[in-house]
Image (cartoon, rainbow, N blue to C red):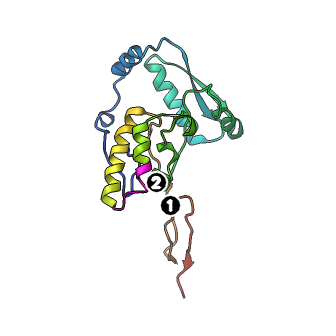
Amino acid sequence: MSFFGNHTPYANNENTGWYKKGGNPERAKQLLSEAGYSGETLVILQHANWREANTMEQFLADTLKKIGVNAELVPSDQAAFVARRKSRDWDIFMGSETDYDRSTPISNSTLSANGEQGWWGWPKSDECEALRAKWAEVETLEERQALAREMQRIQWDIAGTVLLGSAVSPIARSKTLVDLIEMPSLIPMWNMRKVPA
């Protein structure tokens, strides 16, 4: 569950020990109470025409209800979803990204923590933004891996984005096809050609 994808040079396990222990509904209820939650409606934007996201949104709403959250799903088509996401009258929405999208803080907008100018939800962390700005200045893989670990530590603490899981979109091809160049995102047939006869 790395903020930098599953199979990238910057994927790491920083600040995930708590996450890997699994759910603790009683602790969640306690934390909600300590945060001052008193039954307010939590609005989850629901994709009416994206099956995978819709399923996750229903699962999330059900899970939140089990710990006492008044979760409300608000279904809409993609156009209405995008329009409403610009407002401040929602609490949670689902999205998806590839490993390629998540591979660096430059390409991954969900790693921004610059408040009003940032990603939906508008998380704010000057510490994280300072590390993000430093990314272009460092020269070695090891330095960037260290930055990635530190950024991930902060990201899990500010929780501007929460990673729910991962999915695989398998492809199959005939052995008579060669030279496939694996692309990072949704282009499964780039450069493919038939084996010469």
Q: Secondary structure at mark 1?
A: loop
Residue 5: in sight, yes or no? no
Circle 1 sits on which residue? 184
Q: Nearer the viewer, residue 53 or 119?
A: 119
From this viewpoint, which residue is outermost toward the right?
A: 79
Of residues 115 and 8, the one drawn nearer to the viewer in this rendering: 115
Q: Identify residue type, mark 2.
A: Asp
Crowd rating for badge 2 (residues with CA inside 10 Å; few <14, some 14–19, many 20+): some
On the image, the x and y values in percent for residue 145 come to: 33, 54
Q: Write the start and end of the magenta stretch as one range.
A: 133-140
| Residue 118 placement: quadrant | top right
Left or right: 162 in relation to 118: left
Residue appearing at x 62%, y 42% in the figure = 50
- Asked if the magenta segment contains residue 62, the reply would be no
Quadrant in the picture for the C terminus? bottom right
Q: Which residue is mark 2?
A: 99
Residue contact between numbered discs 2 and 1, judged by CB atoms under 8 Å: yes
Pick out the residue farthest to the bottom. Answer: 197
Which quarter of the rendered picture does the N terminus lie within?
top left
Front residue of 144 and 19: 144
Give the total number of marks visible in the rendering. 2
Which comes before the other along the chain, label 2 or label 1?
2
Q: Is residue 109 above or below residue 93?
A: below
Residue at 44%, 13% (x, y): give it: 36
